[in-house]
Image: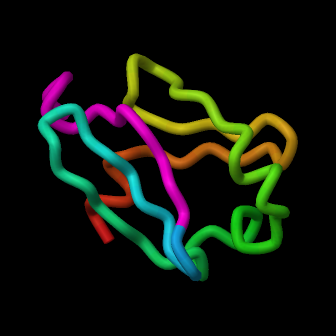
Amino acid sequence: MKTGLTSATGVRFAGEMLYVRLADGREVGAPLEWFPRLRKATRAQRGNWRLIGRGVGIHWEEIDEDVSVESVMAR
């Protein structure tokens, strides 16, 4: 994976979708169905995330969930 091109800069949720904003300006989305912990999480829990590994992943401490950018893009 090339650093910068596929690193995350932000996260948002809309309906039943997770969207990851990438450093190159693109945004990729995946259904929450793919991430059961996120699907079951409250809005507040979903909003409490941090980037890990210089943006190669996103971590939600409270629900013990990690999602890599690569995994969202590969599906």
**Quadrant in the picture for residue 68:** top left
Residue 39 vs residue 28: left or right? right
Q: Residue 74 in the image: state x and y as whole percent.
A: 27, 63
Q: Residue 5 in the image: state x and y as whole percent.
A: 13, 33
Q: Locate the C terminus by quadrant.
A: bottom left
Magenta residues span 1-13
Q: Residue 7 in the image: state x and y as whole percent.
A: 29, 32
Q: Nearer the viewer, residue 32 or 15?
A: 15
For the point 73% across and 39% down, the residue is 48
Q: Is residue 61 above or below residue 34?
A: above
Q: Locate the N terminus by quadrant.
A: top left
Asked if residue 18 lies in the magenta stretch, the reply is no
Q: Nearer the viewer, residue 27 or 56?
A: 27
- The colour style of the image is rainbow
Q: Residue 36 in the image: state x and y as whole percent.
A: 71, 72
For the point 16% across and 42% down, the residue is 25
How many marks the image carries: the answer is 0
Asked if residue 6 lies in the magenta stretch, the reply is yes
For the point 48% across and 47% down, the residue is 11
Residue 61 vs residue 15: left or right? right
Q: Is residue 74 above or below residue 51?
A: below
Residue 68 vs residue 44: left or right? left
The residue positioned farthest toward the top in the image shown: 54
For the point 80% across and 43% down, the residue is 64
Q: Is residue 63 above or below residue 50?
A: below
